[in-house]
Amino acid sequence: MRKLALTLLAFGLFAVTAAAANFTQIPDRLPQAKVGEWVLLQNVSGDNQGDKLKITVTKVQNSTVTVKREHLDADGKVTDSKEHDMNLAKIKDRVADLQKKATSIGEETVYIKERPVATVAVAWDGDDNNDRMAGRQFKLWVSDKLPIGGMAKSWSSDSKFPSYEVLDYGF
């Protein structure tokens, strides 16, 4: 019986090691951001469904990428515009944390303007210690082929958290 238990334990450790070796890494494209690249997102859920958001890199300096976030109305006119600094070290830490929290990570194809984009799809459960996240599920599709942070689309099981998808992008 002990021999069987040791065999099962060894097999289990091998399986975990093999899974870890094949574990897909979440891309972090933000360190390669360049001034002028942009992404146009559309909210696809909740009260703000249809709202659009354009994010453009305005400055890259040392360990910070500055982006301008513009909310657009149905006619494409800017209704709100703010600049936001993204700290590369903090984003790297968030990606590493997400890699640990993920309930699944796999490769999926997303279509943007009928063009296939290979992505890494990451799913995770909300943090029960955070009232805003508790009981919710999330999924994010990320590609190192897309500008800024590489997000192709996002999904939340709760409409209080907007789900977005990329409509267009440019470098």
Image (tube, rainbow, N blue to C red):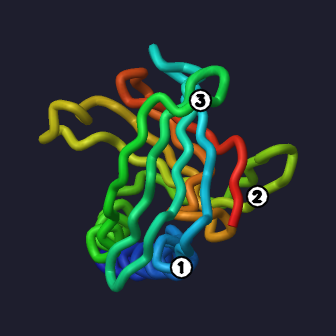
Q: Which residue is mark 1?
A: 32
Question: Would residue 77 be found to the left or right of residue 84 on screen?
Answer: right
Give the Cα distance between marks 3 and 2: 28 Å
Q: Residue at x 61, y 64 (%)?
A: 37
Task: Determine whether 54 is above or below 6 in the image.
Answer: above
Residue 102 seen from this side: yes
Question: Would residue 53 be found to the left or right of residue 16 on screen?
Answer: right
Binning the other alpha carbons within 10 Å of mark 3 as few (below 14), some (14 to 19) or many (20 upward) gives few
Q: Residue at x 57, y 77 (%)?
A: 22
| Mark closer to the observer (3, 2) | 3
Element marked by disc 1: helix
Q: Which residue is mark 3?
A: 77
Which dot marks residue 46?
none
The reply to whether dot 3 and dot 2 touch (C-beta < 8 Å) is: no
Question: Which residue occupies the extreme top position in the image?
Answer: 47
Q: Amino acid at mark 1?
A: Gln
> Residue 116: x, y in percent?
82, 54
The reply to whether dot 1 and dot 3 touch (C-beta < 8 Å) is: no
Question: Which residue occupies the extreme left position in the image?
Answer: 129
> Residue 76: x, y in percent?
64, 30
Q: Which residue is mark 2?
A: 117
Element marked by disc 3: loop
Element marked by disc 2: strand
Q: Amino acid at mark 3?
A: Lys
Task: Determine whether 14 is above or below 104 in the image.
Answer: below
Give the Cα distance between marks 1 and 2: 18 Å
Closest to the observer: 74 or 20?
74
Q: Residue at x 56, y 75 (%)?
A: 34
> Residue 11: x, y in percent?
46, 77
